[in-house]
Image: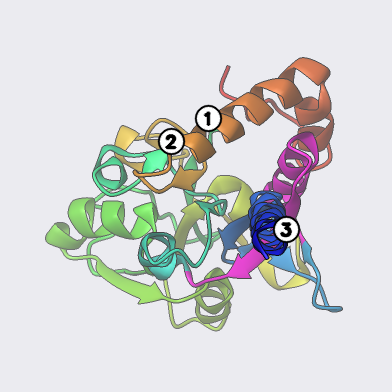
Amino acid sequence: MLRLNLQCAALICGLAMASTSHAADVIRFGVDPSYPPFEQKLPDGSLAGFDIDLGNALCAQLKARCVWVEQTFDGMIPGLKARKFDGILSAFSDTAARRQQVDFSQRLYVAPSSLIAKKDSGLLPTPASLKGKSVGVVQGSLQESYAKAEWAPAGASIQSYQTQDQVFMDLTSGRLDASFQASAQGDSGLLQKPQGKDFAFAGEPVIDKSIIGNGVAIGVRKNDPAMRQRLDGAIAALHASGEYQKIAAKYFSYDVSGE
């Protein structure tokens, strides 16, 4: 009887270890797939973009299976804290304010932001120029925080939306005077499309530290240093092997690493 009990205990222990090992081989990333070229949903329902390719490459480096959990951008930090996913990989900038709630991996890339408006608008990304104008931003984004802090006090009307597609829709229909988003996102998401033919970047990119912070990185829970260390090691390996540069070249004609 004792031998049987020991055998059962060993079996149960083995199953538990196998379960733990299997769980460790899955990394869940929170993503808002409305930010091309960083992340988007294709007509067949699959996800694509720079962040998606990076995440899949990181998982391959770690011999883990990537699971992408869709989440609106303003719900990213609450979703991470609620353990809906293990990391935020969705053009998520590393800033001092966010560091109060989450930790970050090493930098993935740098993404300046730009204002987009009608080609003949004469608008600039300044408080004086945007006085009395309506500017669309994504809810929960750093662009929203910057616009409300810098432009709203001077009289700009900052309109927040759940997705970038909604911002572009209202911009092209004339319900907004301008939109404010990551430069690469505005270029591929609107300016390179037929509906963006009458629009252009307005003024120079905004590179204020409150926008780009320390660059874009992966947000992880503060009580999960092991995950941060695993991701840091994988990011370094992608740079060393040249895989990072290969992925970036698919989306950008310039160096986005910030190095």
Q: Nearer the viewer, residue 183 or 35?
A: 35
- Give the secondary structure at mark 1: helix
Whether residue 101 appears in magenta in the rendering, the answer is no
What range of the chain is rendered magenta?
48-72
**Disc 3, SS:** helix
Total label count? 3
Q: Front-most of 97 and 141?
A: 97
Q: Which residue is mark 3?
A: 7
2 and 1 marks in contact (CB < 8 Å): yes
Image x and y of residue 81, in percent: 37, 60
Query: Who comes first in sequence, dot 1 or dot 3?
Result: 3
Mark 1 to mark 3 CA distance (whole Å): 37 Å
Q: Residue at x 55, y 83 (%)?
A: 173
Residue pointed to by mark 2: 225
Residue 181, given in percent of the width and then of the height, sits at 48, 55
Q: In the rendering, which numbered label is found on residue 229?
A: 1
